[in-house]
Image (cartoon, helix red, strand yellow):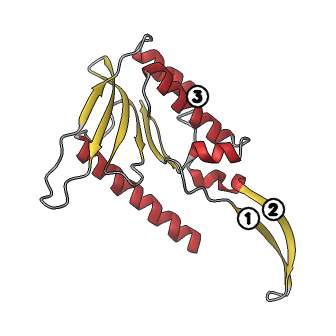
C-alpha cells in the first residue's frame, strides 16, 4: 500500500509539474495529433528545456524551449527562449526514427524498477520468524530526469525516467534505459544540441 501511495503522489506531481512547465514554456498543454515532447528536469537551476517535434497544419516543426522560473520577489514571468531546430534530415523522418526507437512502447520507470537491484538473496528474519527475500535497490542522486509525452494518431504514451543515463552506466542491461538514452543521443546528434 505504501508503494502505491508513493507512486500516486509521484504521478500526480508529474502531471501538475508538466502543466506548470507548459505554462512557463508558453506551449499548449494538449499535444498535437503527432507530437513528441521531452521535458528535461531542471535539477537545482531556475530553468530547463522542453524538446518538441510535431506536425501542425501539415508542416513539421521542431524546437527547443528554455523556460525559466519566475523571479521570486515580484513573481514576474521570464519569457522563454524558443530555438527553432533544423536538421539535414526531414523532421518527419526524425519523428519516425524516434518512433522506431520504441518511444510509444517504453513503460513507466516503476515497471522495470526491479532491474535496478543487486545482492538478491533469501535470508531468515528472526523478527518475522520466516524466510524473506532481500534485495538492495541502488539510488542514483546525480543526473537528469526526463518526462516524455508522445502522441501519434490514437497511440499515446507518457513516462518519466529519473537519471536514465546515470542508471544505464551502472545497469547496462536495462533495455528500456538503452532505448530511451538512444533516443536522447539520436535527438542530440540530429539537431546538434546539448539536451
From the viewer's side, name the closer residue of 56 and 192.
Answer: 192
Q: Badge 1, how many Cα within 10 Å: few under 14, some, many 20+?
A: few
Q: CA distance from mark 2 to mark 1?
A: 6 Å
Which mark, residue 136? 1
Binning the other alpha carbons within 10 Å of mark 2 as few (below 14), some (14 to 19) or many (20 upward) gives few
Tag 3 residue: 101
> For residue 117, what is the image quadrant?
bottom right
Which residue is rendered at x = 86% and y = 75% of the image? 123
Q: Tell me which label, 3 or 1, sits earlier in the chain.
A: 3
- In the image, what residue occupies the spot 63% across and 41% down? 176
Name the residue: 44% across, 34% down: 195
Instruction: Determine the secondary structure under disc 3.
Output: loop
Screen quadrant of the N terminus: bottom right
Disc 1 is placed on an element classified as strand
Mark 3 to mark 1: distance in Å? 30 Å
Relative horizontal placement of residue 150, taking residue 181 as reference (left or right)? left
Would you say the residues marked 2 and 1 are in contact, meaning their CB atoms lie under 8 Å apart? yes
Amino acid at each position: 500500500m505504501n508503494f502505491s501511495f508513493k507512486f500516486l503522489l509521484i504521478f500526480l506531481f508529474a502531471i501538475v509539474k508538466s502543466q506548470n512547465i507548459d505554462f512557463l514554456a508558453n506551449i499548449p498543454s494538449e499535444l498535437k495529433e503527432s507530437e513528441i515532447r521531452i521535458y528535461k528536469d531542471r535539477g537545482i537551476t531556475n530553468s530547463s528545456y522542453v524538446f518538441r517535434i510535431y506536425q501542425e497544419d501539415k508542416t513539421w516543426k521542431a524546437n527547443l524551449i528554455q523556460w525559466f522560473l519566475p523571479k521570486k520577489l515580484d513573481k514576474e514571468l521570464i519569457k522563454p527562449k524558443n530555438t527553432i531546430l533544423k536538421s539535414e534530415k526531414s523532421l518527419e523522418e526524425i519523428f519516425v526514427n524516434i518512433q522506431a526507437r520504441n518511444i510509444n512502447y517504453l513503460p513507466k520507470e516503476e515497471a522495470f524498477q526491479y532491474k535496478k537491484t543487486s545482492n538478491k538473496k533469501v535470508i531468515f528474519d528472526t523478527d518475522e520468524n520466516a524466510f524473506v527475500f532481500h534485495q538492495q535497490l541502488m539510488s542514483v542522486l546525480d543526473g537528469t530526469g526526463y518526462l516524455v509525452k508522445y502522441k501519434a494518431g490514437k497511440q499515446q504514451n507518457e513516462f518519466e525516467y529519473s537519471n536514465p543515463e546515470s542508471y544505464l552506466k551502472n545497469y547496462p542491461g536495462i533495455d528500456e534505459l538503452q532505448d530511451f538514452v538512444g533516443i536522447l543521443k539520436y535527438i542530440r546528434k540530429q539537431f546538434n544540441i546539448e539536451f
